[in-house]
Amino acid sequence: MHLRLADASDRENLVGLWERSVRATHTFLTESDIETLRPATRDELGRTDITWWLAVSEADEVIAFLGFKLDCIEALFVDPAHRGRGAGRLLVAVAQRFAAGDLFVEVNEQNLAAVGFYEANGFATVQRLPTDGAGRPFPLLRMLRKAQLSLSRSMGAA
């Protein structure tokens, strides 16, 4: 697996990966929710103020992607066929490397797999928001990973 930056030609592939990931992990969403979110996701993936990193297999297949801006993970999605193989952890490490300090993420509270993933990677909940960014009834958890904790974990300290 290796990392590369996304370009405009990746967008449709990333929308497909997003949808596969959402269907596997966001069981609280209805089909209508996914249909509504797809165009907004396509637009989001075109934002140039977000740095889009891709985890790519040796066969040049995109298996995960990360959107990073300032000190915040804006998006992290892993293809369900590749979950648990280290792509998400690698992308979090990239985000931490480029963060000026602590690293933040907002995650759907109902996405228990994602909450568990972030907790296992040193994040702790610092705030609960009752709705998502569009005001829909999908609570978000704002999570923080301390820069010092990240450094000690990467150096093998307890």
Image (spheres, rainbow, N blue to C red):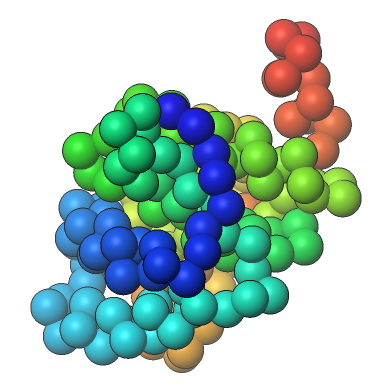
- Where does the image place residue 89, in percent across and percent down from the top left? 52, 33
39, above or below 94, in the image: below
Can residue 62 be seen? yes
Work out whether residue 20 or residue 113 is closer to the camera in this orientation and state it: 20
Whole-percent x and y of residue 39?
A: 32, 86
Say whether residue 141 is visible. no
The front one of 131 and 147 is: 147
For residue 7, side relative to residue 81 (left or right): right
Q: Nearer the viewer, residue 65 or 57?
A: 57
Q: Quadrant of residue 157?
A: top right
Give coordinates of residue 101: x percent, y percent.
86, 47
In the image, taking residue 135 as reference, residue 58 lies left or right, namely left
Quarter of the view holding residue 111:
bottom left
Quadrant of the image occupied by residue 33: bottom left
- Quarter containing the C terminus: top right
Quadrant location, the N terminus: top left
Relative to 49, say whether 21 is above or below.
above
